[in-house]
Image (spheres, helix red, strand yellow):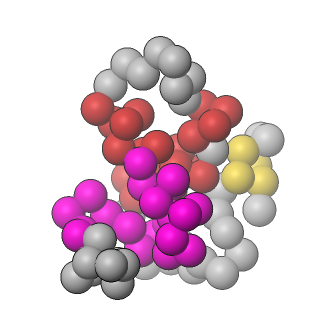
């Protein structure tokens, strides 16, 4: 679904049980290509959101299941 030209969530995800901060993180991650200039990274937050979305794209794990404290092997089931 899009709002103001930005993806706000994937159709498989329910957002009712998440905080506003998590919602903002998901929106930034889903739209990292248009919101973050990879040639001019300005903050740790931009790096974190980009890594989360690339991880989601490459692994098939939904973005809402990826948190910064997760490990690839144990929490996300990747080897």
Q: Tell me: residue 53, above or below residue 73.
A: above
Residue located at (23% from left, 70% from top)? 71
- Percent position (x, y) of residue 57? 58, 62
Whether residue 51 can be seen here: yes
- Percent position (x, y) of residue 58? 55, 63
**Horizontal relation, residue 12 to residue 71: left or right:** right
Q: Tell me: residue 33, above or below residue 26.
A: above
Q: Is residue 64 magenta?
A: yes
Whether residue 24 can be seen here: no
Residue located at (24% from left, 69% from top)? 70
Q: From the viewer's side, name the closer residue of 19 and 6.
A: 6
**Horizontal relation, residue 30 to residue 24: left or right:** right
Corner quadrant of residue 45: top left
Q: Tell me: residue 42, above or below residue 22.
A: above
Residue located at (29% from left, 71% from top)? 72
Which quadrant of the rendered structure holds the C terminus?
bottom left
Give the number of marks.
0
Q: From the viewer's side, name the closer residue of 8 and 77.
A: 77
Q: Is residue 58 magenta?
A: yes
- Percent position (x, y) of residue 23? 48, 57
Which quadrant of the rendered structure holds the N terminus?
bottom right
Q: From the viewer's side, name the closer residue of 64 and 70.
A: 70
- Percent position (x, y) of residue 55? 46, 60
Q: Tell me: residue 57, above or below residue 18.
A: above
Residue found at the far front of this picture: 79
Residue located at (38% from left, 67% from top)? 66
- The magenta segment is 51-71
């Amino acid at each position: 679904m899009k709002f103001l030209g930005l993806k706000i969530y994937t159709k498989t995800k329910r957002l009712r049980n998440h905080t506003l901060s998590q919602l903002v993180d998901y929106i930034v991650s889903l739209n990292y290509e248009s919101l973050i200039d990879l040639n001019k990274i300005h903050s740790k937050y931009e790096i974190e959101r980009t890594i989360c979305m690339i991880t989601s794209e490459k692994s098939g794990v939904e973005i809402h299941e990826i948190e910064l404290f997760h490990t690839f092997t144990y929490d996300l089931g990747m080897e």
